[in-house]
Amino acid sequence: MTATGIGAPVRRREDFRFITGQGRYTDDIERPGQTYAYFLRSPHAHAAIRSIDAAAARATPGVLAVLTGDDLAADGVGGLICGWMIHSKDGTPMKAGAHPALAQGKVRYVGDHVAVVVAETLAIAKDAAEKIVVDYQVLAPVVDMNAAVKKGAPVIHDVAPDNVVYDWHLGDKAAADAAFAKAKHVTKIDLVNNRLVPNPMETRAAIGEYDGGSESFTLYTTSQNPHVARLVLSAFIGIAPEHKLRVIAPDVGGGFGSKIFIYAEETVCVWAAKKVGRPVKWTSDRTEAFLSDAHGRDHITHAELALDDKGRMLGLRVKTKANLGAYLSTFSSCVPTYLYAPLLSGQYDIPAIYCEVEGVYTNTAPVDAYRGAGRPEATFVVERIVEVAAREIGQDPAAFRKKNFIRKFPHQTPVIMAYDTGDYAASLDKALELIDYKNIGRRKRESARKGKMRGIGFSAYIEACGIAPSAAVGSLGAGVGLWESAEVRVNPVGTVEVLTGSHSHGQGHETTFAQLVCDRLGIPIDQVSIVHGDTDKVQFGMGTYGSRSGAVGMSAIAKALDKVIAKGKKVAAYALEASEADIEFKDGRFGVAGTDKSLAFGEVALQAYIAHKFSGQDLEPGLKEGAFYDPTNFTFPSGVHVCEVEIDPDTGVTRVDRWVAVDDFGVIINPMIVEGQVHGGIAQGVGQALLEGAHYDASGQLVTASYMDYCMPRADDLPSFKVDHTTTPCPSNPLGIKGCGEAGAIAAPPAVINAITDALGHEDVTMPATPQVVWRAARKAAFRTAAE
Amino acid sequence: MTTVTMTVNGKSVTANVDPRTLLAQFVRENLRLTGTHVGCDTSQCGACVVHVDGRAVKSCTVLAVSCDGASVTTIEGLANGAELHPMQAAFREHHGLQCGFCTPGMIMSAVDIVNRKGHDLDEHTIREELEGNICRCTGYHNIVKAVEAGAKAMGGTVAAGIAAE
Amino acid sequence: MYAFNYQRAKSVRQAAGLLAKNGEAKLLAGGQTLLPTMKQRLASPPVLVDLARIEGLAGIERKGRAIVIGAMTKHADVATSTLVREAIPALAALAEGIGDPAVRNRGTIGGSVANNDPSADYPAACLALGATIVTNKRKIPADEFFQGLFTTALDEGEIIVKIAFPAPSKAAYVKFPNPASRYAMVGVFVAKRGSEIRVAVTGASSDGVFRWTAAEEALRSRFNPKSLDGVAASADGMISDIHGSAEYRAHLVGVMAKRAVSAALGK
Ligand SMILES: Cc1cc2nc3c(=O)[nH]c(=O)nc-3n(C[C@H](O)[C@H](O)[C@H](O)COP(=O)(O)OP(=O)(O)OC[C@H]3O[C@@H](n4cnc5c(N)ncnc54)[C@H](O)[C@@H]3O)c2cc1C
Ligand code: FES
Ligand code: FES
């Protein structure tokens, strides 16, 4: 390992601009002549729009335009799309209701887009928006999933008269039923996976711009995947053809999934820019973010686990209702289906699994992928039911898990996935040691002496990352292929620019990707730059989500680097007057085997460009190579997280006292960055378990629409974490990387709830386990103990 | 319109502003110092923290006109030329940032903590003192380490810390 | 924010004059409540009268057995004041627990007391310590000042100038913060001066800060947390929201009161 190569904790190269205030986020950009957009949003959860009178708003000095859904329709601008087709059990396609960027005839959730005002200043736009008179016919809303599927519930989209988007299943029902028929013990649980609001600290923003001379558009936007945004805006929404639309995602202040999607606001900004003939800028405020960013999770689940007489798992049955909100967001349909059910085997050898999922419309904000997307929900089901099962049959939860772990690889689960490699027991053993499991009894007694209740909770998670190969996701309904692209441009002096389709919004690609280049080419890291986030520079790419940038994005770079080295060998052979077969590339030099003749990488680059030593017919001049990498399988990061909590039964306050994470991410490029990803994920997972929850009242108003009511994890809510790892390199990509971006968020929630329920001695705790929830549960525990 | 004059990062600036202009808007839009960020509407996230007369404040909750005559330091004014402030250096060294959006506010708050509580900060104090700064990326683990180290380093360069104000 | 006219007052008299001229004008103190409200367009005063430049409105002094705090004194200055820490450490600790450091660097005691947010901390201190709110017109005992949710005895155009807190022999404030906003979900201030015992509760009641007389009586016989065993606050009239039901808040009032008594006893 070199100081800047693979495995080194290289300090981040992007940090200088951020710590000195020179980051450049979308809202930092000011375009000449820029105007400001403000969206008038629905105050009602469900209403028909009889009419919109915008005359007074239009007449306000400084207002350039007031546009509504009618204007969109008149210009033939298409609706927002959902890019993953799911078929119901009976083979019928999912029921996707129309999703215009500005409401056409009806609003379906509080925050739905009714009109946009474009004005010289934001203040003028807001003032004018208040003058728009909308005549609403308020309709009964339905907020609760169970109520939405009842007969006679208000209908949100005519295409789905029962508010069911799809009724989907996966697995072999007969096999699962047979397993339950022979079970000695069946554990049953009911779970709610709470709705979350992603809340990257940078809110969404967009600047649309139109250049009449070249008839082309530019969109600056807070996107995790600018190419996908361009594709959707072009091919589906029809704003402009791809070669006339440039999408730039500059520095992006966190995404966690919520910036994958193509939303109404950026669509409208691009379209409106041409209408007003000036750049149109919109920056979400936090309240708008709460109302209209795609939310995450929101499942209700019943699960059953069948065990034999020795405590071996025989089968799992899961029935889930997933709230998809008022419209299908860009990838929403796949989250509670193909990103969820295939993970229900967890780390366990379960011969039969059957899962049914009903996707449901409600009058709430659309729900889509949020850090982990489907996999946290699956892990919550598996790790809660496994914990409860161990407790019910009186086995130690760690030993129970270990007994049921998959030990032989590759392992085909009954739910699509073929796990390639792993050593689950190794992670568990290490975690037990780090948390000092053998002394947990003593620590519990010490807490009890102080009047506190201590509990320990495990979570042995698995995730499927990379979200690829393309053929596999295509067969499951994806509208796109999920490979990644890279281009390596070697300049004549030997400096290197890597263009990647991955996008960094906190993950540190400018550092880790450069480490790979250093490692392969043997050149100093300051001679490498990473270019991303601009469709005019990078030809195409699928973006960053699903912990895929390492496993897929870097593999594409590795492949392109291999091509660069191969071409370099050809050039070197001419320059060194040797046979190509004799050229070796080592430590940044091309040498002739068995001699001391060699050229540095930069010298070969120069030779490639001056092309004096070879004829352009035999070898093309230049040194630039591209690659598209499509992996052979998903990757399967896994690990064990253990959490210890101490509860104050008088107030219900739960303090997370200890946290141990032992993850297997395969090969690690930069341990410092990987640990940072784990920390952040755990914080979000603890947030889900203890603090966060989006709450709509019965009329469909979002009660938690600001940080006054939506509880974000703060520094004093969390402990420091003990993070370690084990390694089984991933066999399905050339670098052996599995991915690390989502692990913490996936692993953490069941660990916390398992610890709380361990402390309380009963299972009746819902997320978020706020002080009130835990206090009630603690009282129940006290009554129970008193009754015994 | 109201006229304000203040010193920002050591330079005197005078401007005619609409009284409703917030200090955050003023530095971002009028002065184009976009390192100060806005992350919420309820004065809770701390992305906008700057120093006014040496004290940390949320610039999204202060009128620019209120700062007439004041001395304001933003994240852009913290480094001494090319030389990073010890707290900035500590954030980089300890990987106290990911997306970087909360970072300017975090660093400004961290410097303020040291100014008030000294150079020897324990984890508990740091976590409590960061109550007004929300980070969604880091889980705070490395921020806490960075603040602790930055505080110590500021002890070694007291002069630099004060000079920056 | 809606547009407004900004006026910088040089004296309390001038500020009062500006208020009198425009009935809808509002005073601007630290702005930590008013500005967020205006930003969300929930308030639209046509005129803001900034108190920040009025000389003598900020500052802390000791007058006999009382600590007198100027209306424009910032939370941070109360928290770190040696005078306050010596005479009424519970008050300094309360100030230290308001919001976060940046909020404490701007927010003022006058603004907080005038606003009388049902979840604010200072009202509990005023009531439990038997403070006197001194305005440009009169002196108002805390018992008469707080009149329910965001309502006070202040007349239109009346300005708080300072607040006088008689020092207790023992006192403590214990706050159970709302997990999200960190305002008080329940805050109990307990103060003992001679035989007089006052217990003030904030955050819990939908009528705002109140004195919990049952607890006061129980503590009068013996100032000890045990005296509160079996004394339960009623859930009637308690705030009920997603963070806590009325029942939970009532329970917390009891727990926080006991903890406050323990803390006052130095336990
Ligand atoms: C993030 C955050 C967290 C907070 N947490 C807490 C908390 O935990 N506990 C808590 O108690 N508070 C909390 N606050 C509120 C804070 O304490 C405010 O500072 C306080 O409520 C108002 O004081 P101000 O000086 O900022 O007043 P302003 O916002 O300027 O004014 C508030 C109101 O009082 C009026 N007013 C101001 N001064 C006077 C005067 N002298 N005479 C008459 N009327 C006057 C104004 O006209 C206005 O109506 C928090 C605020 C924020 C932003
Ligand atoms: S923007 Fe100032 S506190 Fe959030
Ligand atoms: S680094 Fe992204 S919010 Fe803190």
Image: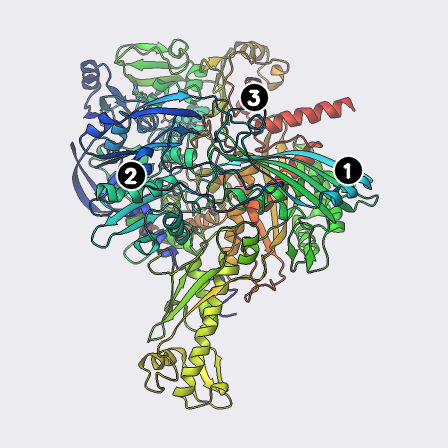
Tell me, for residue A186, which label it has, or none.
Answer: 1
Contact between labelled residues 1 and 3, with CB atoms less than 8 Å apart: no
* Position of A153 relative to B148 (above/below): above
Circle 3 sits on which residue?
C252
Q: CA distance from mark 1 to mark 2?
A: 59 Å
Please give the residue where the numbered disc 2 appears in the rendered image.
B24
Q: Which residue type does callout 2 highlight? A: Ala
> Horizontal and vertical percent for residue A646?
63, 36
Name the front one of labels 1 and 2: 1
From the top left corner, tell me how far across and down residue A576 is, in percent. 41, 88
Amino acid of disc 1: Val
**Spatial distance from mark 3 to mark 1, Cα to Cα?**
39 Å
Residue situated in front as seen by the camera: A396 or A149: A149
Q: Which residue is found at the position 27% from the left and 56% from the top?
A: B81
The one of A702 and A620 positioned closer to us in this rendering: A620
Pointer 3 indicates a residue of which chain?
Answer: C
Look at the numbered disc 1 and say if its residue's Cβ is closer than 8 Å to ligand 3: no
